Each structure stands twice: as C-alpha cells, then as structure tokens.
Amino acid sequence: MVHRSLSIVLREKGVALIMVLWVMAILSIVALEFSFAMRTEITVTKNHKEDLQRYAMAEGGVQRAITELIYKHDARLQQIKKTLSLEEIPPEQKEWMADGRSYALPFEQGFCEIRIMSEAGKVNINMVSESLLRKIIGQMGLEGEAKDVVVDSILNWRDPNYLYRINGAENDYYLSLKEPYYCKNGNLDSIEELLLVRGVTPELYYGKKETPKGEEEAGYRVGLKDIFSIYAPGEQVDINSATPLVMNTVLGIPREVAQQMGKAREEKPFENQQDLLNRVPELAPFIGEVGRLIVYRSALPYYTIESRAKLKDALSVQGLKAIVRIDPREKEGYRTVQWVDRLIDR
C-alpha cells in the first residue's frame, strides 16, 4: 500500500515537472518573440529617424543652393563683387558656380553634396532641330536603327499631328503596351516625359558610370536629363554654365578642352568669343563649327538643384531635386517649379 502511494506521488511529481518544463519553454518562446519584435521595432524607428535626418540635410542643401542663386542674381551684391579681387574673397565665400560642379555642405550628423545646373547650359527639348537632336543622340553612343528610333520617336511625341515618322511611334504603339498610354503630340511639360518615349531607356535618360579603356577610375556617361530642358531658351547653350559633359556631347568639344574651359571660367565668365579664344586657345580648331550654338552670360533664371545627403558611418543616401526660378518679385526671392523627393542616383 505504501509502495503504491509512493508510486502515485512520484508519477504526479513527474507530470508536474513536465508541465513546468512546457510552461518554461512556452515562456522562453514568448520572450524570444517579444525580444525579436522589440529589436525590429527599434531598427524600424532608427531607420525612420535616419531617413528624416537625411531628408532634412538634403533639404538644407537645396536651401543653401537657393541662397547662392539669389546672391548671384542680386545686382547690388554683384556690383560690390566687381570691386573685389579674387584674393580678397575667402574661399568659403566664393560664389558657387551653376555648371554642375559639386559642393560639400558639412553637418554634425554627416554631409551634403550639392550640384547646381543652370538651365541656360542645356538645350530646349521642345525646340531642338532634328539635325542637332540626331547629332546629340549619336554622340551619346547610339547608332543605326537604335538612334533613328529615339530621334523619330521624340519628334513624333512633341509634334501636334498623328503622322508617323519612319522609325517613330504614335498612339497605336503606346496603346499596345502592357501599361498603355497616349502619345503626347505636344510640347513636353517636364523632362521626365522622355522616359515615356519609345527607345528611351533609363540608362539613356539618367546616364551611367563607366570606365574608359586605359583608365582606372570610373567616369560618367551623360544622360538625356543632363542635356535637355524645357526651360532653356533654344538650341544655344550658355558657355559659362554648360557642364563639360554637355560641351562635349552637344558642341563636340574634346573633354580635355571642355575641362580647361570649366577651369578658366572660375576666375570670371567669358564675355565673348574673342575672350573665350584668348583664354582657351585650344578651342580655336572647333569654334567655327560650334560658334553658332554658344551664347555668353545668359540671364535665364531657371536652375536645377540636386542635393544628396549622407550620414556618418552610413551607406544610404537621400537625394532631392528642385527646379527653381529666381525672381526678386517673389516674396522669398524665388519660386519652386518642380520638386522631386526621391532622386535616382547615377
């Protein structure tokens, strides 16, 4: 009888032990799940905080660029500047160039890379002639049918009729796509519309990094977005604000000479053709062909600003793009005509 009672007690204790072990296992799983959920929530919160910091820094970069542009268009300040020599102006106070060069803006949390491009240094996509368009697309590396498709399709996109060019595209092509849409048959309202045109790939539009043969460092192949604008006056580009890549692609000027021109205009803008040739004599063999496509010191007030922010010890970059019109009549001295929150990087 005693042995039977002892056996029952031991059995009950064994069951209790197993139940305790199961409860501990369940509690451990719950604790691990809770810990994982908390870590995930902390990571999401941290990423969101960093996104906000990068966005604020990039936005600050845009505002700094706008301040520089307002200064550039202030007649009184520019008059004062003419009385000063380059040596009298501290490096950190020198006027920013609107030719696509990079400027760094440091922050406590990281830094911002800013580029300003005057729309006067580009070609108007709504006004460019077929011959110049064909030359530019060829300079960008397209040949044969691929070049003809892009050129004819751009011309078909902007012309007001429904007549087909030989290698172009009209409504029947665009409506046959997986996600159909109509051909514009009118002027482009934004340069991004080119991405809708037959033959225009993201690579052709945005450009890409590449390493030329014999060179160790990667360069940048120009994209349509770097060359064309809807705000530029016409086919002519302002030689004082065109980027070296645009000078090379649109004007056919060798890259080395284009780089020399960019360096020479840091001191002061080119006033006219004679001034340009005096300061960059290497351009002389090319001036006869490209002279008609050049203007000097355009007063066009439209600018593209690209601002990219990066936190210290972080890989992610936040990019913003703004197109602004500098106008003293506006309350803030400028007007934003386009704002892009997520800038696709090169």
Image (cartoon, rainbow, N blue to C red):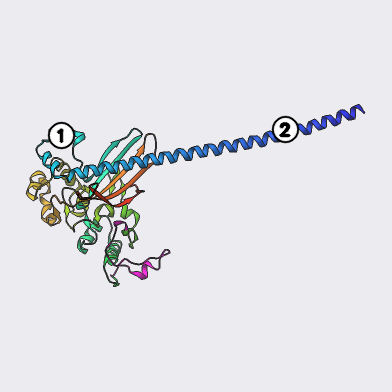
Q: Give the percent coordinates (x, y) of residue 297.
A: 13, 49
Amino acid found under the numbered disc labelled 2: Val
Relative placement, left or right, of 19 versus 209 is right
Relative placement, left or right, of 29 versus 250 is right
Q: Outermost residue, bottom direction?
A: 163
Q: Give the percent coordinates (x, y) of residue 316.
A: 39, 41
- Between 286 and 191, the one nearer to me in the picture: 191
Q: Is residue 216 among what the camera can see?
A: no
**Is the magenta region chiefly helix, strand or loop?**
loop
- Between 107 and 162, the one nearer to me in the picture: 107
Whether residue 176 is in magenta: the answer is: yes
- In the depicted structure, whether residue 128 falls above or below residue 307: below
Give the total number of marks visible in the rendering.
2
Residue under the point 24% across and 54% down: 227
Residue under the point 36% across and 67% down: 182
- Between 305 and 338, the one nearer to me in the picture: 338
- In the depicted structure, whether residue 187 falls above or below residue 94: below
Give the residue pinned by disc 2: 20
Which quadrant, please, contains the N terminus? top right
In the picture, the disc for residue 89 is: 1
Whether residue 129 is in magenta: the answer is: no
- Secondary structure under tag 2 reads helix
Q: Give the percent coordinates (x, y) of residue 99.
A: 21, 46
> Picture quarter containing residue 318?
top left
Q: Is residue 132 among what the camera can see?
A: yes
Residue under the point 52% across and 36% down: 39
Amino acid found under the numbered disc labelled 1: Ile
Residue range (magenta): 165-192
> Picture quarter containing residue 87?
top left
Q: Outermost residue, top direction?
A: 2
CA distance separating discs 2 and 1? 79 Å
